[in-house]
Image (cartoon, helix red, strand yellow):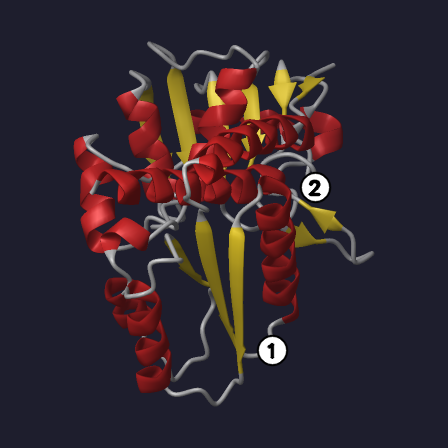
Amino acid sequence: MSRIIDGKEVSSYIKEQIRKKTEKLKNKGLTPGLAVVLVGNDSASKVYVRNKKAACELCGFYSASYELPEETTQAQLLELIAALNADNRIHGILVQMPLPAHIDADAVVKAILPEKDVDAFNPENVGRIMLGNHSFLPCTPAGVMELLKYYGISVSGRECVVIGRSNIVGKPMAMLLLHDNATVTICHSKTADLASVTRRADVLISAVGKKAFVTTDMVKEGAVVIDVGINRGEDGKLCGDVDFESVSKKASYITPVPGGVGPMTIAMLMQNTLTAAELSKRS
């Protein structure tokens, strides 16, 4: 039976370290500030925003929240971002995705100053991640790396397979593994004989968003399985990409959903905001 990788425990540990560092910064007259912008009425996004505000409070950050109506124009949103770019109290800006269809998400991402882009979506920050010369890392892939580190799981020299090639998780995940000297394969919807590739993985990371997509026949005995997927089952409960019941009998370590990677995403957002505040002090 697998050992469970507890994201709640690890995220609590990281947020406590951030809180201690924040106290020291406050004593020097600097309070990290995060602005979260939500456009529209997406219920899942509202939950995420609420959780981010709670994490800011826990870490001792200044938090600003902007909930804009669905009909907000792109020009109005860009105007708000420009104001936040110029606000010295704000070190990190996060615009919650997805945005309404009439707003160009790429234009919004590019409008956020790279030094305040705590999601690490701005093309400059994406390029820096590729080069290994970065200030911020995308929150979910960074959270996965922290989980592996906390549990003493080294990827150096090991075969890692990432299922999914999104710009938010799959691609940066592969790059972070590569920077840690893993041998990395990215799989996707066009991969031929997917199971034969995933069975090679010492560390298997799934980020496809399909319930029970990863089954036991796709997993090597003793592999580490990281489930980034967030889906809802027929019963309405949250579940991941991995068929947890069967795969947990075969894997050496596995993340549950919920309670695995999810809590780490917000913890790493807090880490990026703290880093942004520290960098602002040096500039």
Q: Is residue 137 visible?
A: no
Q: Give the quadrant of residue 267.
A: top right
Provide the residue designation for mark 1.
Answer: 41
Q: Is residue 106 above or below residue 266?
A: below
In front: mark 2 or mark 1?
1
Q: Which residue is found at the position 38% from the left and 35% from the top?
A: 173
Provide the residue designation for mark 2.
Answer: 258
Q: Please tell me which residue lies in front, 216 or 207.
A: 207
The quarter of the rendered structure image containing the N terminus is top right
Q: Which residue is found at the position 39% from the left and 53% from the top?
A: 92
Q: Which residue is found at the position 69% from the left and 16% from the top?
A: 2
Percent across and percent down for residue 238 are 72, 50
Disc 2 secondary structure class: loop
Callout 2 environment at 10 Å: few (<14), some (14 to 19), or many (20+)? many
Percent across and percent down for residue 34 are 46, 55
Question: Which callout, 2 or 1, points at the residue further toward the start of the chain?
Answer: 1
